[in-house]
């Protein structure tokens, strides 16, 4: 099939600038030949700084026409959110806009999805605030998507073992996470810590690979030095979700239902109940780590 016929329209929602893997995922989407990146929306905290990072990385990939829209800066009800954007300091001297209009993300996503019913894949790799607001203000939107792909959750089986750890995106805005999982798009896939933690590279290997790739990853290499002040490695949480949107066979999956605890002592825990046949959600349960890294770097180095 020709590449143009196989292109996948994508909206990317991100809290880029806190953990470095959001930027690493964006670099992949910008270079993936099958990705028709319709726009990027930012969420939580200093959303304009996050938008500036998207702009700078996109420009380094030669994409100066990418729609970029800041979204919700505060959580819906409770939760810590993700207030700060530490990686912005690494590139603040590069040319970028400082006049992004506030809170345009939800309407941009709504109009884009409605203009292409059944086509758009919504990839979200930050707190779920923008998605929850989108689905609440236009309840028909989930049914108009092709699929939702999340980096979210650490899936604790409802029976058989006790409460597990919480994943940052899910716990940052627990009510938004619960609202998002209530949506029923045609396909809803989550990549949680259960699999993403298997996809790590040491800092030195990342430095070498980012510098060799140049372009967007060269800029991201500068941002990564802020990350490496407190981490000796990069976990490719968000890039796995991005790559699997185009190559689902990178992972193995289970079908079932995700519910989110919003009232307990540890709000944001994602509870998993495997279905005997079908369920509204699908979660990744295993990843072919070597194939994933081969896919990622073959795309960004092309």
Image (tube, grey):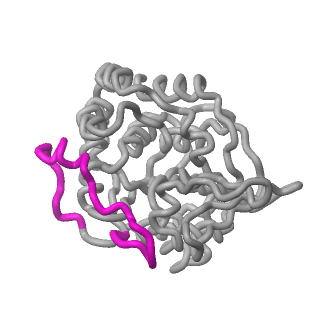
Q: Quadrant of the C terminus?
A: top left
Give the camera-side residue of 143 and 159. 159
Whether 282 is drawn above or below 194: the answer is: below
Image position of 93 (left or right of 59): left
Q: Position of residue 197 (x, y in %)?
A: 54, 38
Q: Is residue 143 visible?
A: no
Identify the main secondary structure in magenta. Answer: loop
The verdict on residue 199 being magenta is no
The verdict on residue 73 being magenta is yes
Report the residue at 25% width, 34% height from top: 225
Q: State the image quarter where residue 229 is shown.
A: top left
Q: Position of residue 105 (x, y in %)?
A: 38, 67
Report the residue at 41% width, 41% height from top: 21
Image position of 252 (left or right of 110): right
Report the residue at 66% width, 57% height from top: 188
Count of numbered circles in the view: 0
Image position of 104 (left or right of 150): left
Report the residue at 52% width, 71% height from top: 176
The single residue placed furthest to the left in the displayed view is 93
The single residue placed furthest to the right in the displayed view is 276
Q: Position of residue 299 (x, y in %)?
A: 47, 28
Give the camera-side residue of 6 and 206. 206
Q: Is residue 109 visible?
A: yes
Give the camera-side residue of 165 and 221. 165
Q: Quadrant of the N terminus?
A: top right
Q: Position of residue 151 (x, y in %)?
A: 54, 50
Q: Which residues are magenta?
A: 72-100
Whether 109 is drawn above or below 7: the answer is: below
């Amino acid at each position: 099939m020709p590449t143009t016929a196989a292109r996948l329209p994508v909206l990317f929602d991100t809290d880029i600038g806190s953990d470095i893997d959001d930027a690493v995922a964006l670099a992949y989407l910008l270079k993936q030949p099958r990705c028709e990146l319709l726009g990027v929306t930012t969420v939580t905290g200093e959303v304009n700084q996050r938008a500036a990072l998207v702009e700078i990385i996109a420009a380094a990939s030669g994409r100066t026409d990418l729609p970029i829209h800041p979204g919700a800066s505060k959580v819906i009800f409770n939760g810590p959110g993700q207030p700060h954007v530490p990686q912005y300091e690494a590139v603040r001297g590069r040319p970028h806009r400082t006049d992004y209009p506030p809170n345009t993300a939800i309407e941009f996503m709504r109009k884009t999805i409605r203009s292409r019913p059944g086509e758009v894949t919504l990839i979200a790799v930050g707190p779920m605030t923008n998605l929850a607001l989108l689905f609440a203000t236009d309840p028909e939107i989930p049914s108009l998507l092709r699929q939702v792909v999340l980096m979210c959750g650490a899936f604790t089986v409802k029976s058989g073992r006790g409460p597990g750890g919480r994943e940052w995106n899910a716990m940052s805005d627990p009510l938004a996470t619960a609202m998002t999982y209530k949506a029923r798009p045609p396909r809803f896939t989550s990549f949680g810590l259960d699999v993403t933690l298997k996809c790590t590279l040491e800092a030195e290997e990342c430095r070498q690979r980012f510098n060799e790739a140049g372009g967007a990853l060269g800029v991201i290499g500068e941002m990564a030095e802020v990350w490496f002040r407190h981490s000796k490695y990069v976990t490719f949480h968000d890039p796995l979700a991005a790559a699997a949107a185009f190559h689902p066979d990178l992972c193995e999956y289970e079908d079932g239902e995700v519910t989110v605890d919003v009232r307990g002592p540890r709000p944001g825990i994602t509870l998993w109940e495997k279905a005997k046949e079908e369920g509204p959600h699908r979660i990744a349960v295993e990843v072919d780590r070597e194939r994933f890294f081969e896919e990622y770097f073959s795309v960004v180095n092309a």
